[in-house]
């Protein structure tokens, strides 16, 4: 996936995708202190690599370890497909948006699904992580989530992911 494509898409949706050096990222997110800077959310599990400026609608990443495009799509979903900040967000509500974005960008679906291995659907949907489900079960979830995202106005009828804020 060409990151410049994601970058121009973020801009077209009214936000941004910002690459930082390790030093800039650590300074921006106050890595090493117990606090988080106001308005910025350091994405969990990314090991000082990825974060969100939700108010400013920017995804921020460092060049520390390299960045994986499905993770960027996830952070974009927090910004463009959720009206509440990351800490309060319902990630299930925009899983279909992420899927739609992968399709829209022509991303490798196998790679994207691989990145969702440890994703936990609500227990009423599945009792196992996404990656432990059969491909039929996975597809049923993706179809349902895409339909829900369309019904909620997050994705256009033609499959184009939209910005709702
Ligand atoms: Zn998240």
Image (cartoon, rainbow, N blue to C red):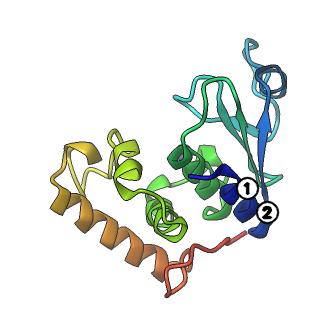
Q: Position of residue 162 (x, y in %)?
A: 63, 74
Q: Which residue is mark 2?
A: 11
Mark 2 residue CB less than 8 A from any atom of ligand 1:
no
Left or right, residue 138 beside residue 18: left
- Image-quadrant location for residue 79: bottom right
Left or right, residue 4 beside residue 122: right
Q: Looking at this rendering, what residue extends furthest in the bottom direction?
A: 157
Badge count = 2
Q: Position of residue 51 (x, y in %)?
A: 68, 37
Q: Nearer the viewer, residue 19 or 47?
A: 19
Residue at the spot 56% in from the left edge and 74% down from the top edge: 154
- Which secondary structure, mark 2? helix
Q: Which mark is residue 38?
A: none
Q: Which residue is mark 1?
A: 7
Residue at the spot 65% in from the left edge and 29% down from the top edge: 49
- Label 2: few (<14), some or many (≥20) within 10 Å? some
* Circle 2/circle 1 CB separation < 8 Å: yes
Q: Quadrant of ligand 1?
A: top right
Q: Position of residue 144 (x, y in %)?
A: 32, 72
Image quadrant containing the C terminus: bottom right
- Image-quadrant location for residue 63: top right
Q: Nearer the viewer, residue 165 or 157?
A: 157
Instruction: State the CA–CA distance, disc 2 to disc 1.
Output: 6 Å
- Say if 25 sits above or below 70 in the image: above
Residue at the spot 49% in from the left edge and 60% down from the top edge: 98
Q: Looking at this rendering, what residue extends furthest in the front direction?
A: 2
- Say if 164 sits above or below 56 in the image: below
Q: Position of residue 156 (x, y in %)?
A: 55, 83
- Which secondary structure, mark 1? helix
Left or right, residue 59 beside residue 56: left
């Amino acid at each position: 996936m060409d990151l410049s494509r994601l970058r121009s898409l973020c801009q077209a949706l009214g936000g941004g995708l910002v690459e930082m050096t390790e030093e800039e990222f650590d300074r921006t997110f106050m890595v090493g202190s117990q606090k988080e800077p106001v308005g910025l959310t350091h994405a969990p599990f990314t090991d000082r690599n990825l974060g969100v400026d939700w108010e400013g609608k920017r995804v921020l990443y460092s060049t520390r370890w390299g960045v994986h495009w499905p993770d960027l799509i996830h952070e974009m979903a927090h910004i463009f497909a959720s009206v509440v900040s990351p800490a309060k967000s319902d990630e299930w509500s925009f899983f279909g948006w992420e899927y739609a974005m992968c399709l829209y960008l022509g991303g490798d679906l196998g790679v994207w699904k691989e990145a969702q291995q440890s994703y936990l659907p609500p227990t009423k949907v599945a009792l196992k992580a996404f990656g432990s489900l059969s491909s039929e079960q996975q597809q049923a979830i993706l179809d349902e989530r895409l339909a829900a995202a369309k019904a909620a106005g997050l994705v256009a009828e033609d499959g184009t992911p939209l910005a709702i804020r």
